Image (spheres, rainbow, N blue to C red):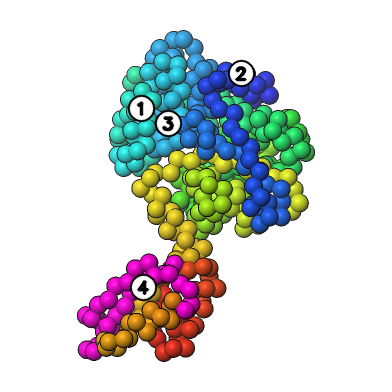
Amino acid sequence: MMLTLADIEQARAKMKGIVHQTPLEHSQTFSRLSGNDVYMKLENLQKTGSFKVRGSFNKIMSLTEEERARGVIAASAGNHAQGVAYASGMLHIPCTIVMPKGAPLSKIEATKSYGAEVVLYGDVFDESLEYALELQRERGMTFVHPFDDLAVMAGQGTIGLELIEQLPDVDVVLCPVGGGGLLAGLAFTLKQLKPSVEVYGVESSACPGMTAAIRHKQPVSIAASNTIADGIAVKKPGNITYQYIEQYVDGVVCVEEAEISRTMLYVLERNKLLIEGAAACPLAALLYQKLPFRGKKVAAVLSGGNVDVTLISRIIERGLVEAGRFVTFTTVISDKPGQLNKLLRIIAELEANVMSIHHQRIGAKVLPGQAEIHFSLETKNEDHIQQIYQVLLKEGYDVQFYR
C-alpha cells in the first residue's frame, strides 16, 4: 500500500470539527535574524498541545467496528499518549496507554483525563513499548504506532494541506523529525501540491536517528544522549517513514542542545509562545544558519507545546545561561569591613544584577582572615560576562566563573 493525496484529503475531512486548523503566524523577529521571511505553523496550539492528535485520530477512524470494539493501545510518555487518548475518547473507544514509571505526573493525569486507562510499566520507553505489545496480543487490541503507519502519516500530512492554503507561495518548510511520521506525511503532501517547495527535517545532534538512517541508507538503531527535544528522541526511525523521507525530503540537519534551549527562551520572550524542545528545532536551524538559503519564504512547524511545568524554570535558566544572561562565579576577599561592599560596588558599576550571594569563611581554599563569596549574576550577553571578568581581574580578584 502507498500513501496518496486522496488519503490526506480524506483524513482532513474525517477530523473536521475535531482537530484544529492551527494558525500560521508571521515572525518579524526570526525573519530579521535569519534573513528570510519566516512564518510559524502553531501546532503547539493544537488539541492536546501537539500535532500527534491528527495522526492518532485518523488511524482510529480507519479501524473497523470490530477493531474499535476491542479498543486501542499505545506506548508513550508524552504527546502520542495524549493524542491517542483524546482521539479514543472522542470516538468512545476503549483505550490503554502504557507509560514509563517515571513519566511526569502532569502527563499521566492529562492522559487519564481523556478517558484512557494508564498502565505504568518499565523505567524507560523501550520497556513500556514491549509491555504494550504484550498487552496488545493478550487483549486483541489494535496497536497505534506513534509514526510508522500510513494512516498516522496521512493524518500528519493534513498540516501540508493547511500550509499550502495559508501560504501558497511558500518556498521552504522546516519540520522536526524523530521517528519520521510528521516529516514523511508533510513532505509527501507538500510535494504533491507544490513540487518546487523544499522540505527539510531538523533533529537534535544528541539523537540524530534520521541523519544516521540517511547515511546508512536504511533505518539503524543509534546510541543517543539525553536531549531537551525529548519529543523527537527516537533511536531508530520507521521503515515506512524512512522510504518517504528518502524520496520527498530535501535534507536533514542537526541542531545542538544549547541552540535548542536558547531558541525556546527566545520564542517565549519575543513571540510569547511556550514550545517544547522538538518544536524549537526548526527555528533553531534558521537562527543558527544550519541551512544555506536567504531571502526565502519559510514556514517552520512548531510541533508542540507540552513542556512539563516542573521543567519550565530549568529550561529558562538553561536558556539564560546559554545566552550569556546568567552566570555564577566565586572569589576570595579579605574578611574585613567594607571589602564585600567594594566588590558589590564594582559589580553595580558594570550594570550586572546580583541574583544571589553566599558568604563563607570555611573552605579548602579559604585561609584564616579570608572569606569566599559565591555570586549569581543576571547579565546582558557573553560580551558583558567577559567585561565583568576582565574588570575583576584588573582589580586584583582571583575569580572562577561557572557556566
Badge nearest the viewer, 2 or 4? 4
Between discs 3 and 2, the one toward the N terminus: 2
Q: Residues within 10 Å of mark 4 (few under 14, many from 20)?
A: some
Count all numbered tags in the image, as a single digit: 4
Query: In the rendered image, is residue 72 in sight?
Result: yes
Q: Is residue 170 left or right of residue 110?
A: right
Q: Is residue 323 above or below residue 12?
A: below
Q: CA distance from mark 3 to mark 4?
A: 42 Å
Q: Which residue is mark 2?
A: 13
Q: Which residue is mark 3?
A: 82
Q: Secondary structure at mark 3?
A: helix
Q: Position of residue 321 (x, y in %)?
A: 46, 63
Where's the C terminus, which quadrant?
bottom left
Q: Is residue 54 left or right of residue 250?
A: left
Q: Residue furthest top?
A: 65
Q: CA distance from mark 3 to mark 2?
A: 21 Å
Q: CA distance from mark 3 to mark 1?
A: 9 Å
Q: Is residue 366 magenta?
A: yes
